[in-house]
Amino acid sequence: MNIVLIPTRTDNTLELFKAGDVLTVNGEDFDFSQIGEGDSLPSSAITSTWFIGDQTRVDGHLVLTMFLPNPWNYSHEQAFPVPLIGVPDGPVVFPAPLPEPLTVAAPENIE
């Protein structure tokens, strides 16, 4: 499975888990095993707003295109993600955001 990521600025979260041709998106299973070689499935046929464009199978590999949510502290890797090629079974790992800045509390009553 290959996943093409389209970055979008949102505070929503995305958790993916891959098991063969089944992709679990935020706890909801999507079985793509019926997509044959050269076939495509439009995102309008999928009951999830995370998918965009046609989902296809090329050279035996599913090619899915999905939105990648970018938080306010998104990293360069999130803003310009590379496709995830040959995604193994298990949790799908995305690029990480930048660390949140440290906040320092103002001292009280300095005399």
Image (spheres, helix red, strand yellow):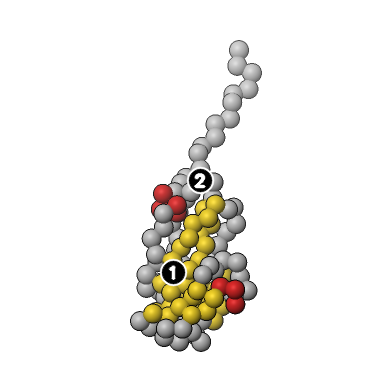
Q: Quadrant of the N terminus?
A: bottom left
User: Closer to the camera, 92 or 38?
Assistant: 38
At horizontal 44% and vertical 49% (from top left) the residue drawn is: 75
Q: Amino acid at mark 1?
A: Ile
Q: Quadrant of residue 29?
A: bottom right
Q: Nearer the viewer, mark 2 or mark 1?
A: 1
At horizontal 56% and vertical 78% (from top left) the residue drawn is: 30
State how far apart marks 2 and 1 are (Cα).
Answer: 23 Å
Asked if residue 91 can be seen in this view, the reply is no
Residue receiving disc 2: 73
Element carrying mark 2:
loop
Left/right placement of residue 15 relative to residue 88 reads: right
At horizontal 52% and vertical 62% (from top left) the residue drawn is: 67
Query: Measured along the vertical axis of the image, is residue 52 above or below residue 45?
Result: above
At horizontal 45% and vertical 78% (from top left) the residue drawn is: 56
Q: Quadrant of the C terminus?
A: top right
* Image spot of residue 86 (x, y percent): 37, 73
Q: Which mark is residue 61?
A: none
Q: Quadrant of residue 48?
A: bottom right
Farthest top residue?
111
Residue receiving disc 1: 3
* Image spot of residue 31 (x, y percent): 54, 81
* Image spot of residue 78 (x, y percent): 45, 54
* Image spot of residue 83 (x, y percent): 39, 64
Q: Amino acid at mark 2?
A: Asn
Left/right placement of residue 54 relative to residue 83 reads: right
Query: Measured along the vertical axis of the image, is residue 33 above or below residue 101?
Result: below
Task: Determine crowd level at label 1: few under 14, some 14-19, many 20+ residues with C-alpha closer than 10 A.
Answer: some
Residues tagged 2 and 1 counted as in contact (Cβ below 8 A)? no
Element carrying mark 1:
strand
Q: Earlier in the sequence, mark 2 or mark 1?
A: 1
Asked if residue 39 can be seen in this view, the reply is yes
